[in-house]
Image (spheres, helix red, strand yellow):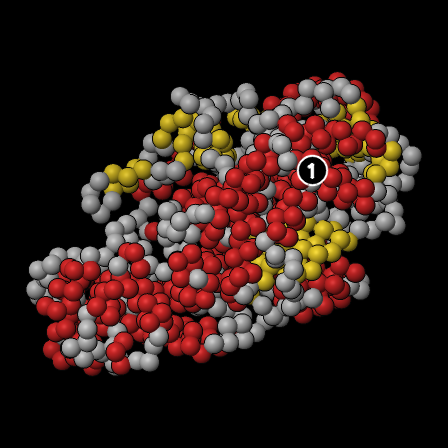
């Protein structure tokens, strides 16, 4: 509500009883805010009653939405918001001071008049009382006093203004206070699956309604869109090919949970979207670049303009992508309104940590499908979280698909142990045995000794070199230095890395020959096809991803090896790749030396190397089982949302701007310092983000300093305009014209491409 409208309301004495709920971004009455929730409740019920076909659940959620903010009628809250709006209305503050409104709202519930079971009453009261999670528990004795001395006096006002039932004044207070005692908080261990899941749904969906209403975004968009039909039409009209076996299978099994192992080139993305059907779907990948590419593909080629994108820098990609409605897409993505949302696992699958407010994420799964693509790319700790998330999704009624090129056997065994494969879940392998793509050579030497061979090969071939660390990549690049040699790793600023990623894809599709020296950055994030691969030894799952960048969809048309694996002085041993699995990989690959390796061989190698029998005494397996055990025994509400997200990311990194780049963008920083409009500041920050690079937090101590630009806040204090970005005093080398340079010139910088920043 605008200032002029506020003045109108409060110049009319008959309107003074209006109860204010919000002052930002504009004034909103309690009646307006509540109606916004109820409107979204109707949309949600209409869209997902088939998935949650229980009128009791929807009725309890409706009641929760009606009553969730009624505690804002209390004198202390109303006094503060009237002062903030300068209405001139003087309201005597409460003698009890500030008490969070969510703890007061349940006292307006006429539970004695409703036909609720004791457990339903507990669910409703706790869903409302904890729809804002606080660091302190409610003082039930104090709340009883406030109820008797102040809240009762507001019953008539609430009844008249909000058109809801209110309690009789003699309703027993203990009916409300007993469920608010900290020891009575609903948990699965104490209360069992049925009551716990009911609580998750009511509280979690109340969060969704409240957050969407407060942000003034739809609760859902495109409820009736059939993702499978959009995909099928795209395959028929654009690709102009019949559905492949994998795609036909997923299309016919939309009602099942699926675990699928399929080799590169089988149309896995389309298969996943065919499985999505008419359901709300979250599609996860480990790397932002891959998500951006999928978003662009669905948005542009499939012409589905409201597809969502959500990851650490998704707003920047949406803006730079030129989408006119990017801000709308960004808001809808952040609030899970999108029918199809491409996202990283840390954005949506962190609920196994049971952090404060996790119910929103968990409840959303009850009517959704989740695709987990390339699960082998994550470390054991993250996989433990994902498997726990799958178990929880299964429990609450959602559906999942694991779609991967390689699936470690220990992960499949864990799902079997949890009985998830026994109940409505299909496991299938799709392997094309009709042709061979790779012949390997195991080289008992350092990869740096192969530079002459690499150079010779590049005269007539596209040669890809993949190593395990940035330092090793730079070392080889220097030895190979020439016009047809290029370098790509994660230590380029975002702007330059994007240029290089575009260039390597262009090169791969051209008629040119030459060399690209890279790190595991290209394993899953960039769709390229080279003629020859030179690689350091890495773990079998990583190696097979590297194989997929050479003869990606082609049959091997000669008798020579096209993959050379170097096993001596392997960089990144221990701190990038687990040493036990490296040793097992070398052991089981040796029999294939100078032999063709089939797709079935690849699948079996992963099964064998990642079997319980091989890993039982390794640190890798110990870490995985410890993570699973910890998640199984985690107490609710130990973490905040941000803490859970940081843990799940699995790597502590920081954004920095190299000093030379920082000096070049002083004008942007000055502009940010002076800009007052919040939307413009956001745009400037996103532009500056393109000049940052992520580095491990523990690196470069003593070489970092804060960004030296500040802006005055409303309280008069000075605040750093970029508090989460530092300046790094390390040389940076890159030429945008020639697309040449080595990036950050630093020692001992290992590659970390599998992040969710």
Q: Residue furthest right?
A: 559
Q: Nearer the viewer, residue 700 or 429?
A: 429
Q: Which residue is mark 1?
A: 613
Q: Is residue 176 above or below residue 426?
A: below
Q: Is residue 296 above or below residue 706?
A: below
Q: Nearer the viewer, residue 616 or 495?
A: 616
Q: Is residue 434 above or below residue 450?
A: below
Q: Is residue 172 above or below residue 541?
A: below
In the image, taking residue 268 as reference, residue 637 lies left or right, namely left
Residue 570 point in image, percent of width and height: 67, 23
Residue 544 point in image, percent of width and height: 73, 39
In the image, taking residue 127 as reference, residue 393 lies left or right, namely right
The answer to whether residue 293 is visible is: no
Where, by quadrant of the figure, is residue 305 drawn? Answer: bottom right
Give SS at disc 1. helix
Please tell me how many numbered marks the rendered image carries.
Answer: 1
In the image, taking residue 641 as reference, residue 512 lies left or right, namely right
Residue 371 point in image, percent of width and height: 61, 56
- Residue at 21% of width from left, 78% of height from top? 167
Q: Nearer the viewer, residue 25 or 29?
A: 29
The answer to whether residue 418 is visible is: yes
- Residue at 24% of width from left, 68% of height from top? 176
Number of residues whose C-alpha sits closer than 10 Å to that of mark 1, classed few (under 14), some (14–19) or many (20 or more): few
Residue 165 point in image, percent of width and height: 25, 81
In the image, taking residue 216 as reference, residue 108 lies left or right, namely left
- Residue at 25% of width from left, 42% of height from top? 712
Q: Quadrant of the N terminus?
A: bottom left
- Residue at 42% of width from left, 66% of height from top? 195
Where, by quadrant of the figure, is residue 449 drawn? Answer: top right
Where, by quadrant of the figure, is residue 705 drawn? Answer: top left
């Amino acid at each position: 509500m605008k200032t002029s409208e506020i003045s109108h309301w409060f110049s009319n004495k008959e309107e003074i009883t209006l109860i204010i709920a919000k002052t930002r971004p504009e004034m909103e009455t309690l009646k307006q805010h509540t109606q916004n929730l109820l409107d979204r409740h109707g949309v949600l019920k209409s869209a997902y009653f088939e998935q949650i076909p229980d009128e009791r659940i929807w009725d309890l959620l409706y009641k929760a939405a009606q009553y969730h903010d009624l505690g804002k009628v209390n004198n202390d809250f109303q006094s503060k918001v009237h002062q903030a709006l300068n209405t001139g209305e003087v309201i005597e503050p409460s003698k009890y001071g500030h008490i969070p409104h969510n703890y007061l709202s349940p006292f307006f519930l006429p539970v004695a008049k409703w036909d609720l079971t004791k457990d339903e009453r507990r669910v409703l009261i706790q869903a409302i009382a904890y729809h804002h999670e606080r660091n302190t528990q409610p003082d039930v004795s104090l709340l009883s006093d406030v109820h008797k001395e102040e809240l009762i006096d507001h019953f008539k006002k609430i009844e008249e203004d909000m058109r809801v039932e209110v309690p009789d004044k003699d309703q027993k207070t203990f009916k409300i206070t007993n469920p608010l005692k900290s020891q009575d908080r609903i948990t699965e261990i104490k209360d069992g699956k049925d009551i716990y899941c009911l609580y998750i749904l009511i509280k979690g969906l109340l969060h969704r309604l409240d957050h969407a209403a407060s942000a003034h975004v739809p609760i859902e968009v495109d409820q009736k869109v059939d993702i499978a039909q959009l995909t099928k039409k795209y395959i028929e009209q654009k690709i102009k090919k019949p559905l492949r076996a994998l795609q036909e299978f997923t299309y016919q099994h939309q009602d099942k949970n699926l675990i699928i192992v399929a080799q590169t080139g089988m149309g896995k993305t389309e298969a996943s979207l065919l499985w999505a059907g008419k359901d709300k779907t979250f599609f996860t990948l480990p790397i932002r670049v891959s998500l951006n590419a999928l978003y662009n593909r669905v948005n542009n080629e499939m012409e589905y303009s409201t597809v969502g994108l959500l990851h650490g820098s998704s707003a920047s990609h949406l803006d730079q992508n030129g989408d006119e409605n990017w801000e709308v897409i960004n808001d809808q993505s952040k609030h899970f309104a999108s029918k199809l949302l491409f996202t990283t696992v840390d954005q949506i699958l962190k609920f196994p940590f049971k952090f404060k407010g996790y119910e929103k994420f968990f409840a959303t799964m009850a009517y959704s499908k989740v695709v987990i693509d390339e699960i082998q790319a994550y470390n054991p700790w993250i996989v433990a979280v994902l498997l726990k998330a799958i178990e929880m999704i299964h429990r609450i009624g959602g559906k999942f698909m694991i779609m991967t090129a390689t699936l470690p056997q220990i992960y499949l065994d864990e799902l079997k142990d949890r009985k998830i494969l026994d109940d409505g879940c299909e496991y299938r392998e799709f392997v094309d045995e009709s042709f061979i793509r790779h012949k390997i050579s195991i080289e008992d030497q350092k990869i740096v000794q192969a530079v002459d061979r690499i150079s010779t090969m590049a005269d007539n071939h596209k040669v890809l070199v993949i190593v395990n660390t940035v330092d090793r990549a730079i070392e080889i690049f220097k030895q190979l230095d020439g016009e047809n040699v290029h370098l790509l790793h994660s230590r380029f600023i975002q702007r330059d890395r994007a240029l290089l990623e575009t260039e390597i894809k262009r090169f791969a599709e051209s008629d040119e020959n030459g060399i690209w020296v890279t790190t595991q950055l290209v394993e899953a994030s960039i769709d390229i096809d080279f003629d020859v691969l030179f690689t350091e030894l890495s773990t079998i799952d990583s190696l097979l991803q590297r194989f997929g960048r050479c003869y990606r969809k082609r049959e091997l048309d000669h008798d020579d090896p096209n993959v050379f694996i170097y096993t001596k002085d392997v960089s990144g041993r221990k701190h990038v790749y687990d040493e036990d699995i490296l040793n097992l990989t070398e052991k089981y690959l040796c029999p294939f030396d100078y032999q063709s390796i089939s797709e079935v061989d690849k699948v079996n190698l992963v099964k064998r190397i990642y079997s319980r029998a091989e890993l039982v005494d390794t640190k890798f397996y110990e870490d995985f089982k410890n993570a699973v055990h910890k998640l199984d025994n985690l107490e609710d509400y130990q973490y905040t949302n941000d803490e859970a997200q940081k843990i799940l990311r699995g790597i502590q990194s920081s954004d920095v701007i190299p000093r030379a780049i920082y000096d070049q963008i002083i004008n942007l920083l000055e502009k940010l310092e002076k800009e007052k409009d919040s939307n413009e500041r956001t745009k400037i920050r996103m532009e500056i983000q393109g000049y940052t690079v992520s580095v491990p937090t523990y690196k470069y101590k003593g070489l970092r300093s804060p960004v030296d630009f500040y802006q005055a806040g409303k309280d008069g204090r000075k605040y750093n305009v970029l508090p989460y970005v530092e300046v790094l005093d390390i040389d940076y080398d890159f030429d945008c014209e020639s697309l040449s340079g080595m990036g950050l010139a630093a020692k001992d910088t290992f590659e970390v491409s599998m992040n969710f920043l």
